[in-house]
Amino acid sequence: MQSEKEGPRIRREQMTVALMISLYCRQRHGKRERTSRDEIAAESVPGLCPECAELLRYARERLARCRFGEDKTTCRACAVHCYAPKQRDTIRKIMAYAGPKMLLRHPILTVRHLFDDRK
């Protein structure tokens, strides 16, 4: 369900995190059992292992509930850390791994995210 806070910026961040998790999962979790699109949600990324699918659900929920809405900074620059410590540690590892690879695979999305980080 889309809330009034979920404008283009939040949706773009949700897409960015989904692509990063997908890239990480495919390359680091290799042959693990995969979820299907129906098991996660209609708008999700199919083919994630259960752990990554759950992290994606969690990240999307956090972005959808962000108190700053469309005026938010990137999560890294935010004064309010809404992720639980375990999920925060996991997403940091994923972003450190997938971030540099995103520039080659999704350059426009990556550059927009880098500009958002400068706000």
Image: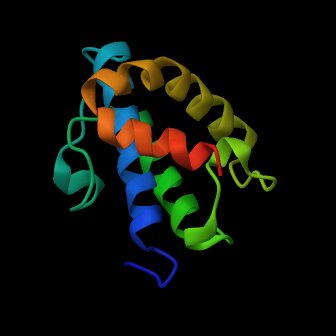
Q: Nearer the viewer, residue 54 or 68?
A: 68
Q: Residue at x 29, y 21 (%)?
A: 104
Q: Residue at x 55, y 70 (%)?
A: 70
Quarter of the figure with residue 106: top left
Residue 87 relative to residue 20: left or right: right
Q: Nearer the viewer, residue 41 or 21?
A: 21
Residue 17 placed where, x, y %?
43, 43
Q: Nearer the viewer, residue 69 or 88?
A: 69
Q: Nearer the viewer, residue 101 or 59?
A: 101
Residue 58 placed where, x, y %?
52, 53
Q: Residue at x 65, y 52 (%)?
A: 119
Q: Looking at the rendering, in which quadrant would you find the N terminus?
A: bottom left
**Picture layout, residue 117 above or below residue 49:** below
**Picture layout, residue 73 above or below residue 56:** below
**Picture layout, residue 60 above or below residue 46:** below
Specify whether residue 15 is in view: yes
Specify whether residue 50 is in view: no
Q: Residue at x 65, y 55 (%)?
A: 73
Total labels: the figure holds 0
> Looking at the image, which residue sits at the far bottom?
4
Residue 78 placed where, x, y %?
74, 51
**Picture layout, residue 26 above or below residue 20:** above
